[in-house]
């Protein structure tokens, strides 16, 4: 059964800090790895990493995929209070997403 | 374009009752999947529908069921509610899996 594990589960930092969120996976048929941000209710899509697209960047957020070591990281630089959220990593299996437990990130002013 | 719409947004039910939740996908999306989110278990897959057919089902008891209509709208039903069913229920639609999942804002179900 596909498995996705995120760490840490919770992280508290000060505004302006840089954070790194981790996601490791064990899946039978790798397709891609997805990152979502969940602030209140609806997870919103951040990045999709695939075998042909192992690095993505959008503003202060960036993510890389290591297919050999089976993990991905999400970096956020110069954090802002608006970055406070739960960050979810997921693998799209057969007709479903398998999620990690999520990392709850809190940015203190 | 309109996003994924879930109704109702909040529900309070009593143990033993049943509940029906609704999800309207993005226009043109034919795949609708449902997830249960709790603090202890995180996001867990319930089931997925495509063109009115259930293609995959998660490890939930038979009290959890769903269906999809010809216009791709989907409903999920939980019968004989238990306290442990209290959760945020999220629906996601996709034009084709495994890409392009968009989530609705969810229905917060509280069982008392």
Image (cartoon, coloured by chain):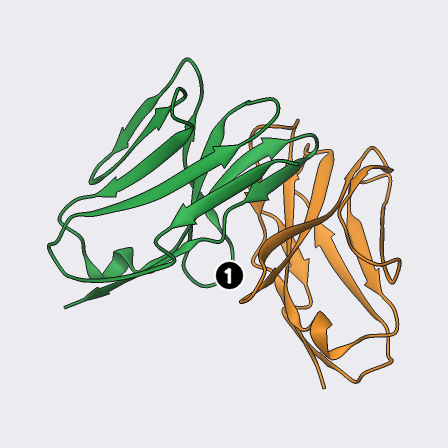
Which of the chains bears the disc numbered 1? A
Please tell me which residue lies in front, A71 or B75: A71
Q: Residue at x 61, y 39 (%)?
A: A97
Q: Residue at x 88, y 74 (%)?
A: B80
Please tell me which residue lies in front, B69 or B64: B64
Answer left or right for A55 relative to B76: left
Please provide percent x and percent y for residue A12: 24, 64
Q: Secondary structure at mark 1?
A: loop
- Say whether residue B108 is visible: no
Q: Is residue A61 above or below residue B12?
A: above
Answer left or right for B69 relative to B11: right
Q: Residue at x 56, y 39 (%)?
A: A3
Q: Tell me what hue chain B is rendered in.
A: orange
Q: Tell me what hue chain A is rendered in.
A: green
Residue under label 1, please give it: A41
Please provide percent x and percent y for residue B49: 79, 39
């Amino acid at each position: 059964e596909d498995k996705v594990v995120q760490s840490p589960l919770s992280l508290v930092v000060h505004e302006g800090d840089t954070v790194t969120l981790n996601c490791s996976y064990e899946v039978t048929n790798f397709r891609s790895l997805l990152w979502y941000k969940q602030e209140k209710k609806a997870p919103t899509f951040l990045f999709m990493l695939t075998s042909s697209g192992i690095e993505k960047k959008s503003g202060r957020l960036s993510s890389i995929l290591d297919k050999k070591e089976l993990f991905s990281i999400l970096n956020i630089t110069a954090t802002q209070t608006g970055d406070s959220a739960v960050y979810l990593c997921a693998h799209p299996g057969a007709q479903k997403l398998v999620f990690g437990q999520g990392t709850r990130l809190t940015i203190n002013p | 374009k309109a996003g994924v719409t879930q109704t109702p947004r909040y529900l309070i039910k009593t143990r033993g009752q049943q509940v029906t939740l609704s999800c309207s996908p993005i226009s043109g999306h034919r795949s609708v999947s449902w997830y249960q989110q709790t603090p202890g278990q995180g996001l867990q897959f319930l089931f997925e529908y495509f063109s009115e057919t259930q293609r995959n089902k998660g490890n939930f008891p038979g009290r959890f069921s769903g269906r999809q209509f010809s216009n791709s709208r989907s409903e999920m039903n939980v019968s004989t509610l238990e306290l442990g069913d209290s959760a945020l229920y999220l629906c996601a639609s996709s034009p084709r899996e495994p890409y392009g999942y968009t989530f609705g804002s969810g229905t917060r179900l509280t069982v008392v």
